[in-house]
């Protein structure tokens, strides 16, 4: 059941990346303006992560899951009045509420997966759970690309907006899942392998493994969300003859490599240290971002697809490294790490501004810098 949550928010993330281009076309929103979708979406994580940690302290992990599913469903249903209003700001508000739910889910599920077992296997365990997130991220652009750019559907003679109908269907699925979680018994984690659910007054900020992880995770999110948000724009600019639907399918291929990267890398962790893999993957992605800046026809687009394979392990590895062996501080540390998803709220706007002012290719210097930060973290802050 917990694994289904990883798929769910991955699917929602995948849809978001397609929405950027959809609103640019349908509501005449600029590239920088469309970045407000990510700003609202990932800004919500910053707002709800710590309250979710407090809620789970008092009522357990299950409460965080149920609250998250409820907010997710409400946000998805708000696409109905947003479609009627036809204003970009209403859609941004709907996505903000939806993302508040996802913030609750990620705080609960990531901590649960990381803490459910021996600390030395936490990176591999969380990578495996996040593999199903990768499946959702892959499916999002496939469905979004095929529906969002198609004409309005006709049901019983009535015109139905494809974006609205997709999110209404998603809300119904989420409500069913919420009902299931209300009635199932979800074992809460007691003190085990250095993890505890009690809070602690000792400051986390003196622990290098945690503070470094907070910075690295912020820049990881800035890189990942920025690259995904403008993948379609970049593909249209640097793949001659491509259409929006073709670019959406290329994004789906990128998400497929992301999912494959999660499964393959989980297996590789039996033979290589997660720290070593994190360094190698970040170095490769630094090179691929610089290739994107060079704007070589088709080659640079293929390089962007490849980036997602090497993005695959970064979030779960940094998260697991950041909360490892923190004992009673684990949940608080996890809340802070989920708050770093706000990095994804900032980078799309900056990249969009660079793209509008100069070129889409030059904007990829921003994720290139982010990978430099991740390399420094893995080299200096992780033992």
Image: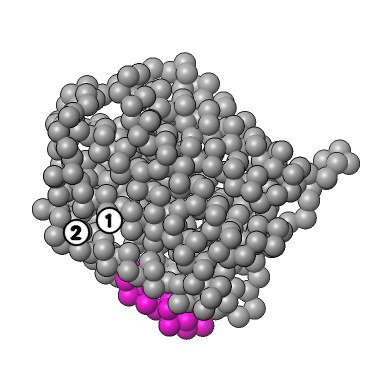
Outermost residue to the right: 157
Quadrant assignment, res 219 = bottom left
Residue at the location (38% across, 30% down)?
52
Mark-to-mark CA distance, 1 and 2 = 9 Å
Q: Nearer the viewer, mark 1 or mark 2?
A: 1
Residue 297 sits inside the magenta stretch: yes
Q: Position of residue 196 (x, y in %)?
A: 20, 26
Q: Which residues are magenta?
A: 285-298
The secondary structure that most of the magenta stretch takes on is helix
Q: Is residue 35 above or below residue 9?
A: below
Q: Secondary structure at mark 1?
A: helix
Q: Is residue 315 left or right of residue 324?
A: right
Residue at the location (78% across, 51% down)?
152
Choose the circle earlier in sequence order: 1 or 2: 1
Disc 1 crowd rating (10 Å Cα; few below 14, some 14-19, many 20+) is many
Instruction: Looking at the picture, tell me which residue is in the foreground, 37 or 268.
Output: 37
Q: Which residue is mark 2?
A: 378
Instruction: Looking at the picture, tell me which residue is in the foreground, 217 or 92.
Output: 92
Q: Is residue 48 above or below residue 288?
A: above
Q: Is residue 269 left or right of residue 246?
A: left
Q: Position of residue 42 (x, y in %)?
A: 45, 48
Q: How is the protein colored in the picture?
A: one colour
Q: Position of residue 268 (x, y in %)?
A: 24, 55
Location of the N terminus by quadrant is: top left
Disc 2 crowd rating (10 Å Cα; few below 14, some 14-19, many 20+) is many
Q: Which residue is mark 1?
A: 216
How many dots with numbers?
2
Q: Looking at the image, do the residues carrying marks 1 and 2 touch, with CB atoms under 8 Å apart?
A: yes
Q: Is residue 45 above or below residue 301?
A: above
Q: Secondary structure at mark 2?
A: helix
Q: Is residue 258 visible?
A: no
Instruction: Looking at the picture, tell me which residue is in the foreground, 103 or 88.
Output: 88
């Amino acid at each position: 059941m917990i694994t289904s949550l990883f798929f769910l928010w991955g699917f929602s993330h995948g849809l978001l990346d397609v929405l950027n281009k959809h609103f640019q076309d349908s509501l005449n929103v600029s590239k920088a303006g469309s970045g407000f979708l990510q700003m609202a979406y990932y800004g919500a994580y910053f707002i709800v992560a710590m309250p979710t940690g407090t809620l789970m302290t008092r009522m357990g992990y299950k409460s965080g899951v149920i609250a998250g599913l409820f907010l997710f469903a409400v946000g998805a249903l708000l696409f109905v009045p947003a479609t009627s209003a036809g204003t970009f700001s209403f859609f941004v508000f709907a996505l903000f509420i939806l993302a508040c739910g996802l913030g609750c889910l990620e705080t609960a599920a990531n901590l649960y997966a990381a803490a459910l077992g021996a600390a030395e296997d936490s990176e591999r365990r969380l990578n495996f759970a996040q593999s199903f997130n990768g499946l959702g991220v892959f499916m999002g652009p496939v469905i979004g690309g095929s529906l969002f750019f198609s004409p309005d559907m006709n049901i019983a003679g009535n015109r139905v907006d494809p974006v609205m109908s997709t999110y209404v269907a998603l809300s119904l699925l989420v409500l069913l899942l919420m009902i299931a979680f209300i009635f199932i018994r979800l074992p809460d984690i007691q003190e085990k392998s250095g993890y505890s659910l009690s809070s602690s007054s000792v400051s986390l900020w003196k622990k290098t493994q945690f503070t470094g992880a907070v910075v690295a995770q912020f820049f990881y999110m800035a890189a990942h969300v920025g690259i995904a948000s403008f993948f379609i724009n970049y593909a249209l600019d640097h793949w001659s003859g491509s259409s929006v639907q073709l670019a959406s399918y290329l994004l789906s291929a990128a998400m497929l490599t992301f999912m494959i990267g999660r499964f393959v890398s989980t297996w590789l962790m039996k033979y290589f240290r997660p720290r070593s893999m994190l360094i190698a993957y970040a170095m490769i992605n630094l090179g691929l971002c610089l290739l994107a800046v060079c704007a070589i026809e088709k080659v640079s687009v293929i390089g962007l697809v490849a980036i997602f394979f090497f993005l695959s392990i970064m979030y779960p590895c940094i998260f697991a490294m950041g909360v490892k062996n923190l004992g009673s501080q684990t949940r608080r540390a996890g809340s802070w790490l989920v708050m770093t998803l706000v990095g994804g709220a900032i980078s799309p706007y900056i990249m969009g501004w660079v793209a509008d002012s100069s070129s889409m290719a030059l904007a990829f210097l921003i994720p290139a810098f982010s990978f430099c930060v991740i390399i420094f973290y893995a080299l200096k802050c992780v033992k």
